[in-house]
Amino acid sequence: MIDRRLLQHFDWILLGFTLVLGGIGILTLYSAATANADITVIKGPVYLKQSYWFALGTGVMILLVLFNYRWLSRLALPIYCLSIGLLVAVLFVGKEVSGSQRWLVLGPVSFQPSELLKISLAIMLARYFSESVTEKGFPLRELWKPLIWTLIPFALIVKQPDLGTSLIVLLIAGSMTIFVKIERRSLLCLTSAGIIGSMVAWFFLKEYQKQRILAFLDPQGDPLGAGYHIIQSKIAVGSGLLLGKGFLKGTQNALSFLPEQHTDFIFSVLAEEWGFLGSSVVVLLCLFMVVWGLSIAVRSKEPFGTILALGLTSMIFWQVLINVAMVLALVPVVGVPLPLISYGGSSMLVTMGAVGILLNISMRRFLFKE
Amino acid sequence: MDRYLTVDTDWYRQRVSGALICVIAAFLILLVRLYYLQIVEGTEFIRQSQNNWFRVQGIPPERGLIFDRNGVLLVENRPCFNLSIIPRQAKNPKKVVYKLAELLHIAPEPLFARLAEAKGVPSFKPILLKRDVSRDAVAIMEAHKLDLPGIAITVESTRHYIEEKLASHFLGYLSEISPEEFKSGRFPDNRIGDFIGKFGVEKAYEPYFHGKRGKQHVEVNALGQLTRVLKTDEAIPGKNIYLTLDIGLQRTTESLLAGKVGTALAMDPSNGHILAMAGLPAFDPNAFVEGMTYESWNDLASNKFRPLENKAIQGQYPPGSTYKIVTAMAGLKEGVITERTRLFCSGEYRYGNRTFRCWKRNGHGSMNVTDALAQSCDLFFYQVGEKLGVNRLAKYAKACGLGSPTGVDLDMEARGLVPTTAWKLKRMGVPWQGGETLSVAIGQGFNLVTPIQMLNLISTLANGGIRYKPLVVSQIVCSDGSLVKKEMPVPLGEFSASKKTLQIIKKGLIDAVNKPTGTGWIARIPGVFVAGKTGTAQVVRMEEDNDQKPVEAKPLHLRDHAWFIAFAPAEEPTVAVAVLIEHGGHGSKAAAPIAREMIRSYLGRNEGLTIND
């Protein structure tokens, strides 16, 4: 199935980044969970579970390397429809966890279809844009299809409600659209529509979501309520200093001052225990991974590969950016996991899947020499 | 030509370069921010991480107190010392616990069990070892503080019922909130582990008693110890409640009931205030907050005399002859008899092929309604009942408040039963028998009433026909003394009978007590006109109970229930009473003297009446 030539072009660097980041994630989770028995009591040993997900993710990754990624272009619509179907199913039969209905339960595992959708949408948009891309850019009238494809899942995910993931969906679609260029006039139209839309959206936000945004603007206004996450996260990160408190020695982590320390706030555990040195290494690793993803986009010699690679890279980029910025109190608290590091099976599988497709595009770049 | 040739690779390269710049810029911001937080501001955050940990601690509100109608304190809160251990500070928790048990001379096993239960809880969190230890134990622990590292004594407030067992059914008790109650959303201000009212006034007025939880915003250090209080939102204490109960009368009533199984209650006829509500056997509500062993709970729950039941509102009994008041009222109002109607009592009444007897075997002779009430003639009321029919009788019973709860603000009130032909057909699937009407007319048969319904009935008769909701609370007051709410009398209905009819019935009841031939002669009080009605509620149906043995010779569970309902002074009534003694035998002997002493006690103290025997 894979010939020697392909194997020669295998992208060991991307694979390396992925494995290193995943390993760091499991190590950090080990610390987060050992320090806080509550998590272990509720969820069992999360670092072990994460290891299983990581192994499973590696399987998914290998699977997605085996065939020519251009098949994805043909399968774009069925994959997209499947994802939408699952999202609709979640609305009816999804498991509710602390007020949000995000999970589909299949036997012992639960899965978030919204994660899968990120990739399906990227494939769908890549196919559409690659078929009609021009240097002039897209006029508004050619954008209504991608707009609808984006807004349907966006609405479904907002309904769950999962503000973080729906935001990521918009950002992926937005990045890809801007990448393939849109006419200046259309860009202005879309931007102003977006601004008006978000102003209208404020009125539809849940009370806790408004609280988070207000708390971000003024965390001291309610240090024990909505501002708590932000303040505690800042203390954890800041008290890491240059070298950190050491592995398993983070006190903010240990005394359960950190909220969601094994999922969305895992980076603050890392920053507390490994300091500026450790956390900037992780940030740089993420940066290199994203830059590498962009280079795959450039090196691919055909539009579908280029645009898809960009879409998937943007997914990783936005998640890293928003997650870390949230932990560092640069943006309001939105539930976005840190790829490969935060605890969570769906996120792990989907990130590994995206890496698999990137590897696929990367190793097949020479099949399209002009 | 392929679409992808419309744009060349250089164009893509240019687009990607744009993206690359954005990406690098964004990550640069993250790195600068990291540098700022960890290097520039780091020392400040490390200080905060050591000292400046915020915590919110709840302050449980002080529960409202309970007073009687005259301001006598009945239920208060007392400090309760709880023993906990913080494993992290104890270093070797098992050793410390062993030492502790040795010092206090208590068995270490239950304490070890608590430790084992708390496995997996972060080690800086205190684990409760023992609730409510004595002051002596606290003193011992203070003295050996250094030998007991990690042992913490916390004080909380716990409920204290000053006179144990006094008015226990009325006051009720507290118990730990159950997970179901916690989840129900009815107790939004409570936490798991809180005690809430589960019975009696404690339950009915829970929202008033509870108050509002306070909050203390504190800083704790690396060991989780409190270092500074930042802000305190004081808890708002619960409201104090003044009952309608007259605790003097309550105490007298309970002592009168001593050794019996039954209930006795009193009401102010002018407004429905419950002045006394005693039931025996009783329980000690303190036991519920102090923590009951399984055995003592089992003893309470399986006792055949049902100490946990408030017999005044939960007990359902046939009303016996007290029901003749209803039959008389219906007969007079419906015109089947008048004041002057005389019916003959030969001691036996033939109905179909059955013989119904009067309690007086050789008959009362010719009787009018007043005599029939006074001497409780069964034959007179058989005939009135026969003329009325059961459904007309039921209409009056219901108008008197029978067959439905009185609405008193206490839990688990029973509704009683007023039988009708439709009820029997639906319930038993067989049609009504004419003879059953005769039984019903004298308060036997299917009839069931609660003592509070009978109290309300006699109280209504006393005040001239207005049926009030029985009130348990007279006023609710803030801890600072300001009035929150005064419970006003709630009229529920009015007797449809005319004043004249009521006068006729009253006359019968006065004669019952004040004429030597009356069944309630034993309840007379010289100097006061008491009006009353005896009742003997058959436990075994009449037909089956043909032996003429004296009451004392029968086994307890076959003896009849004794009733007496009364009010006084007859002309201007200020108190109504109802007494029910389970298996007490005849109402005249078992119940009437208790009612008499209740009235004597109440009037003696409240009306300044000098009563000479």
Image (cartoon, coloured by chain):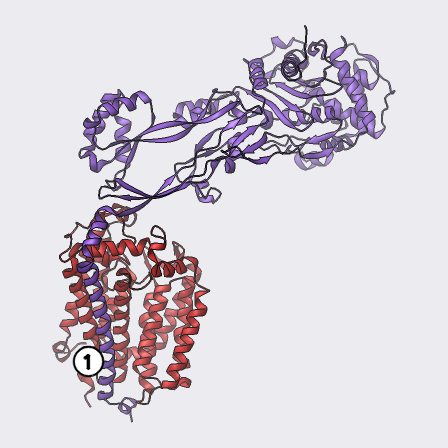
Q: Nearer the viewer, residue B140 or B252?
A: B140
The answer to whether A173 is drawn above or below residue A18 in the figure is below
Residue positioned most to the top: B613
Q: In the structure shown, which secondary structural element does the residue marked by tag 1 occupy?
A: loop
Q: Which residue is mark 1?
A: A364
Amino acid type at image mark 1: Arg
Which of B164/A277 is in front? Answer: A277
Location of residue A211 in the rendering, given as x and y in whole percent from the top left corner: 39, 58
What subunit carries mark 1? A
Locate residue A70, reporting x and y percent.
Answer: 27, 80
Colour that chain A carries in the picture: red
Q: Give the tally of numbered discs.
A: 1
Q: In the figure, residue B562 lies in which quadrant?
A: top right
Quadrant of residue B603 in the image? top right
| Vertical position of residue B52 compared to residue B428: above or below | below
Q: Chain B hue?
A: purple
Q: Which quadrant would the N terminus of chain B be assigned to in this image?
A: bottom left
